Image: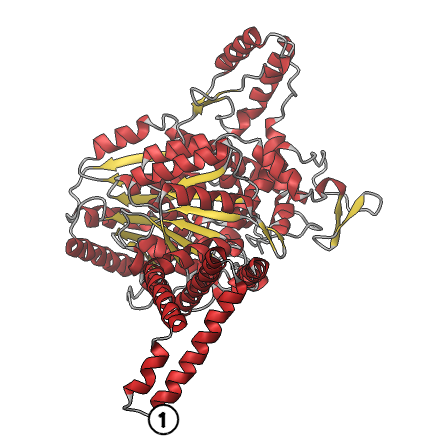
Amino acid sequence: MMAEIIVAAVVTSAVFLGSFGKIARLSRRGQELVALFVFAVAIVSLTSIYYYCYVQSETEILGYFSAFLRSLFGAIAAVVNVSNDYAAIAPVLNSSSVLTLIYWFAIMLAVSAFVLAIGAIFGRRLIDSLRWRMSFRATRYLIVGCNEDSLALGVNIANHDHRLITTEKTDAKRVVRYLACPDDTLDLETMLARTQDFGAMVAEYSPLTFARDLRILGRQGIGRNGPRRNHLIIALPFYSDALEALGQIADGAADGSLDRHRLAIHAISDSTTVAKTVADLARVLDIQCLSQDELLIRSYLDAYPPYRFFDLLEAEYEKDFNVVIYGFRSFGQRFLDYLIQNGQFLGSRMKALLIDPDIETLAARYRHHRPALDLCVDLSTENADLGSMRLLDVLGQKLDDLDLILIDTADAGVGASRGRELVEDVVELVSRVSGDSGDPGDSDASVGFTTAAGSADCAHSLASPVGKPLLVAKDESGLTVFDGGRQRVFAYRSEVFSEENLINSALDNRARLVNYVYNCAPDPGPDCAPDVSSDTAVSDVSLGTAVPAHLAYPDTATIDRQWEKIHDVFTQDSNRATAAFLPALAALANKPPTYADLENPISADPDLLPKLAENEHLRWMAFHVVKGWQPLSLDGMEKECARRAQAAGEDKAAIKGFQKTARRQHACLVPFAEIDIVTRRYNQLLKHYGSTAPTRDFVREDTKIIRYLEWINSRTGYC
């Protein structure tokens, strides 16, 4: 009989585990009923095993059951036939076999009741735990932190990630899941209720469960349609919790259980400590840290890039780019950083007027961390109390030449009502001068285009210029843009916490290709136009057309290996900044921002190529300047080469001194006309010190990204 019991237990377990995928899709009530049934089956099995072990007689067990059944049917018959004659029932109940069975049956009921009570208490947690682990195969986004921001992110992912849900043949609740921490602003039950609309899974956070889930997510990156990347988003309100989560990530990186090919990590935090920790982890993982303000500015710049302030068809970009920032605190400084990086155009000079009651201190601190700022922007300051009418006086004097006005009333401490009044006054002033109605009710949620993958309109020839001056108002909820008579709101939760903005896979893929072009792609040679003759062309299946041999698309592994050689966040961000500026380069050539015609490349125009290369050099300089870099003189470059030659020993390839990373100095932070001088001097130093490092042509390196612009656009699905 023991063999029969073991076989029955194995078969029952196999059936239960095999059907767990369907059980996980049941409602909570259905899962609890299944759990209770399993407990009941377990009790019956244990009781049978007990009888077999202690009675040691199969015949006696069957005899007990046979006697019990005869007695039971006899008692039922006696009750039915003689309903009030208890004497007729008594002999039956006095049977020793019946009493024994009643005794054991009572014990079994008591034990079953106890186990079922325990199951009712812990059954849901057990089922949730099993359901959480068994359904991890389809999970792509694990969000650590339960708050309004992370909730909005999950909603946006569930609403916009139709491609994943369709190709994986699954539903949103198996794509997005949350871990709720004790310090979260939303508790577990609230998150369960708030996520019912898109069915996200929610579980309690603990260091052990997070470490387990992290390893599962880091290892399983193969979907039904081939390799894919999973995403871990850390959206914790307190930086101490974020640091604890990053500590678990560091442990996973140390023991090799996290695969950077399969897991991308995104931390949302304003803490400098968190940012520093992320920078350290970037040496071994695909991880980045962004603040909410940076995400908001990113979202704004996608819709209103600086090149849209110029009428490119009329070559109007040969004019100054004038900006006024009212309230130069944390957000205002970051906003200006991004404008400087993306607002550099050949023949144009960026000028910024900063207004704040403490502007001397704030501007001095800003300049101190960016010592070479004068290379990229002319700053002027105005001391005025925030919320005063001084802004209207300044704007009235400069309004005709202004392109952009930022009013930040949130960080400056201006009251909400006073901030709204100030914005209304400026809107009225701008509309009066520009002749627009200024009706804020005329809302346009589709102004311009966005650079997210699949959202750009490839039919347009050029993005239309925005109305000038463009007014941008910052408050606690986000940014409001007044473009002539149109109004657009970039809210923190609806615009910032989205897959397109936070994860932005299209931009990341372009950045990887930019890095490959700079480091591995062959130089097209002296002629600008690529050779598309039959004897040099190779078939490129991914594009469906013949492309020049030097433009043949490498496999993803090659691109990823080159990306993995980057061991610092700065270089990764530099590649992302280059990728983000590619639409501007195309627009400056009077081409659509998504231009990808390999047969008619922009670089084929010998007059246009050096201008675009110089413009790219201006952008590259601006990126380094806002990161705190400054020029390295020719004498400084010579001293650096001498120092490295002395320390190199036999490693002659280490003798290359065009930059001093520790002091943030670079020899190429000079006007484009002086790059040839730097190139010649650097190559002379390499020869003088016997370096085996390759010689450089910094001018051609600036033109290289222009030559590959169409190739990058065509390979990343940007259109």
Secondary structure at badge 1 equals helix
Outermost residue, bottom side: 81
Residue drawn 17% across the image and 41% down it: 384
- Residue hosting label 1: 81
The quarter of the picture where the C terminus appears is bottom right
Residue drawn 61% across the image and 34% down it: 562
Q: Is residue 557 above or below residue 396?
A: above
Q: Amino acid at mark 1?
A: Asn
Percent x, y for residue 708? Answer: 64, 42
Query: Label 1 neighbourhood size at 10 Å, few (<14), some (14-19), many (20+)?
Result: few
From the viewer's perspective, is 616 left or right of 521?
left
Q: Quadrant of residue 239?
A: top left
Residue drawn 64% across the image and 51% down it: 714
Q: Nearer the viewer, residue 140 or 640?
A: 140
Residue 469 appears in the picture as rendered:
no
Percent x, y for residue 250? Answer: 44, 33
Percent x, y for residue 482? Answer: 32, 58
